[in-house]
Image: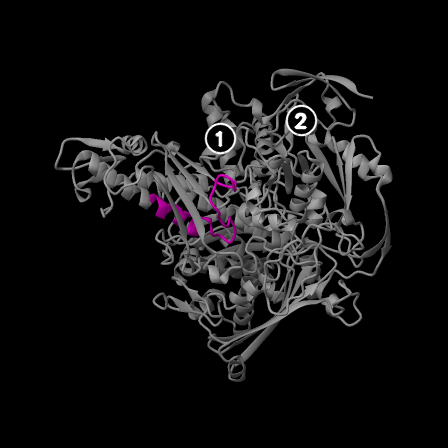
Amino acid sequence: MATTTPTKTQNLVGRRVRRQEDPRLITGTATYVEDIKMPGMLYAVIVRSPHAAARIRGLDTAAAAQAPGVQAVFTGVDVEGVGPVPCAAALPGLRVPKHTILASHRVYYVGHPVVVVVATDRYLARDAAERIEIDYDPLPAVSDPEKALAPGAPPVHPEWPDNVAFTSHTEGGDLKQAFATADLIVKQRILSQRLIPMAMETRGVVAEWRAGEKHLTIYSSTQIPHLMRTQVALMLGIPENHLRVVAPEVGGGFGSKLNVYAEEALMGFIAMRVNKPIKWIESRRENFQVTIHGRGHVDYAELSAKKDGTITGLKIKIIQDQGAYHQLLGPLMPALSVLMMPGIYNFHNVEADIVGVFTNAAPTDAYRGAGRPEATHVIERMVDILAAELKMDPAEIRLKNFPSSDAFPFKTATGLFYDSGNYAAPLRRAMDLLDYSSAREEQREARSQGRYLGIGVSTYGEICAFGPSPATPAGGWESATVRIEPTGRVTILTGASPHGQGQETSFAQLAADALGVGLDDVVVLHGDTSVVQYGIGTFGSRATAVGGTAVYLALQDLRVKCLRYAAHLLGVQPEQVDFEGGVFSSSRIANNISIKEVAQEAHVCRNLPPGLEPGLVATRFFEPANFAFPFGAHLAMVEVDQDTGETKILRYIAVDDCGKVINPLLVDGQVHGGVAQGLGQAMLEEAVYDDYGQLVTGELMSYAIPKAQHVPEIECERTETPSPVNPLGVKGVGEAGTIGCSPALVNAVVDALSPLGIRHVDMPMTPQKVWRLMSERKPA
Amino acid sequence: MEKAIRVNVNGRTIEAKVEPRLLLVHFLREVAGFTGTHIGCETSVCGACTVLLEGRAVKSCTLFAVQADGRKVETVEGLAHNGQLHAVQEGFWNEHGLQCGFCTPGMIMTVCQLLSDNPDPTREQIRHGLEGNLCRCTGYVHIVNAVRAAAKMLAART
């Protein structure tokens, strides 16, 4: 077997290459779900519950069925044969309510789907939907997780009157001993409020049934086309290979499209019934009401330490709001928080309890960070509270508690092995960038003038690149097929499903370096189950670390095969062949042969080398042995206006370590976007339900996501500690910014307000909330 | 009930009979066939549906098609000429001013107006000018870079 001694490559990896996917996006010629048009296509509108809890006494669809343009009306009874919306979490004792795709006797949250109207035109469908009469008998509702646990609370699901969806207990080390021998224990209740993911493109589904072929195609704005195909085929009771799922251009996901939703099976079912293509596009209001929400934590934390600032133990109780149903991974979210509860600190005594709670509200599930922002927020707040108690500098107490850089793989109290790390490096770099001691001096000066200046430190670690299959519900590997076509063009089929992250570019960079072809010679295909081999999808900062590695391995296989082919054609031994710039040559002969010529030969096969098969296709599946654990330090400098409670972010510094970087431009973009979403949680966003279970923040007019003026200039740098988990050395960066950001901002504001004796502020830190806190504490 | 309208979209005259309630964005997407303009919120908050009506940025999800009768509309599809991208499109591409791309057409149209009003905006003025357009992916930093880059390109081209 020939070896592939590395030759001089073009080294596109590591360069700020602008994206291959952009031309279609900046010219308005990309195809999102709503852009799909088919002859005879019908439009579906879903009639949803206006009540958070109610019995359905009666349904009258007759007037709607006779309305102009209406082709069909479906109710819960009509879809009884369709399987429930799946939950893949297998926790011991998990209570799983039957989540039918349409409600039939009772509704459990505002937005619960009840009736579907199908018409020839979206306007006519909406007109007809208004003629649906549903007789509801409203019931008491509860949408706050702590109120739901209180005695006498209305039961969300009557079969489980305590509203407990699940509980779990985790222990590591000896917390009792740590607490008994601690010099101090600090305690705090910390909220990670319910958030709305708000991808710019709402969800949408187009379904097309070909009766003759018994073949269903579902186009859906999803992050997981393959997993969705398996699940929806099961729900509909059709063979999986009679269902094709296509994720066309997807306008953002952030976890909200890492799911299998009722509407995907529903539209498939309706297409098969009406025998015409059908389109459903979620309205923004529906998106707010029924697409998963994130977070929803009430956390009670206790951190123990020695007088010198050495952290010894953490106890946490998590009350997590599951909403009315479990979606695909919902119950696993707080479990992820528990895994990461120790942060990046060197202590080994932990105890955690989770209570998952049913409420009359939209289901919660993975939203950017998915359990890790909650965990990081708790530990980073607690470390700051401890530092304040001990009158230590928050950076100093962190540096004191990091494991040393030679302690990796670092075994945590929750049983993880952090793959590689040098936690002090990004913090020291961030402090240099801020000029930390001068900033503290400036703060002292400001305080002497009665101004509220604060510096927030956040050092995070995260678990990503999901992950080893035994630790995931549906396989943690990823797949890639690489083909060199007869003309020498390269086609990459990835099982990942990028939707803005830019892997059409970064994977092409890998191919260009491995095969000596140009970026424009490479096409990356994804998101179509009839085109791409089975894959897992894009979420959990995994697409490059796991999916990119599969691509890399397939590229290496092809490179070896091409080299053997070239050696045969050149008449030399494989080990005598060099490969540079797409050309195979040998010092022994004058001839050379390009990879394009090899590609042609490998397909016409006039001179097939002995022992080699025709064709240039390689498929690889990469199963990672561990997760990857990126880390970093975010520093924020803020000033709080005492008259308005407004926080102005003066500096924001992000020094992240996501291992090796393939395209720094894309990594910067991921950090910026992540920080903006962390900022949204810290400063602006909160999904609010009232006591009747009505979603008060049901539109963009009442739910504030960051605008351009809210996000500061983000000063971005990196340290680089390669991951040993994959040959690329990459870790993942999709969620890092979100995880690092919220504690940096909250710690900064609390630091600013500390002269008033304030030691904690819950998110979102709206001006009104901060102003009120300041007014209460201000000396008269 | 239907009304005959004539709208100039990207230099092409589109004649159609439409219901008075037909939204301009649906007219552009489904009657005129320009699907580059997206619908993000239906309440004029997000700006994904921004187009130029007689040269001014408007949100096409809260205008009726009949309000564009006899007028000129430009969408993102009308910006490039003979295969040459508009400077704003170039700027977004070069500076990685987009990720999922859904907000991008509306964002680009808003920037076109912003730069025609103020050919050399500061970063702060750009952020202010973009307050009617939401992006959930980029954190806006690269969008601001893109607008600055486009301003420089436009200045060099004139």
- Here the colouring is one colour
Outermost residue on the front side: it is A212
Classify 10 Å Cα crowding around label 1: few (below 14), some (14-19), many (20 and above): some
State the mark number for residue A261. Answer: none
Tell me which residue sits at (74%, 68%) in the image: A160
Q: Please provide the residue range marked out in magenta.
A: A526-555
Do the numbered discs 1 and 2 sit on residues whose CB atoms are within 8 Å?
no
Question: Total marks drawn?
Answer: 2
Vertical order, A175 against A539 (above or below):
below
Which quadrant is home to the N terminus of chain B?
top right
- Residue A652 vs residue A135, the one in the foreground: A135
Q: Would you identify the image quadrant in which residue A8 lies?
A: top left
Vertical order, B6 against A773 (above or below):
above
Which residue is under mark 2? B30
Q: Is residue A575 left or right of residue A166?
A: left
Classify 10 Å Cα crowding around label 2: few (below 14), some (14-19), many (20 and above): few
Q: Is residue B6 left or right of residue A741?
A: right
Vertical order, A381 against B20 (above or below):
below
Amino acid carrying label 2: it is Glu
Q: Chain of mark 2?
A: B
Which residue is under mark 1? A23
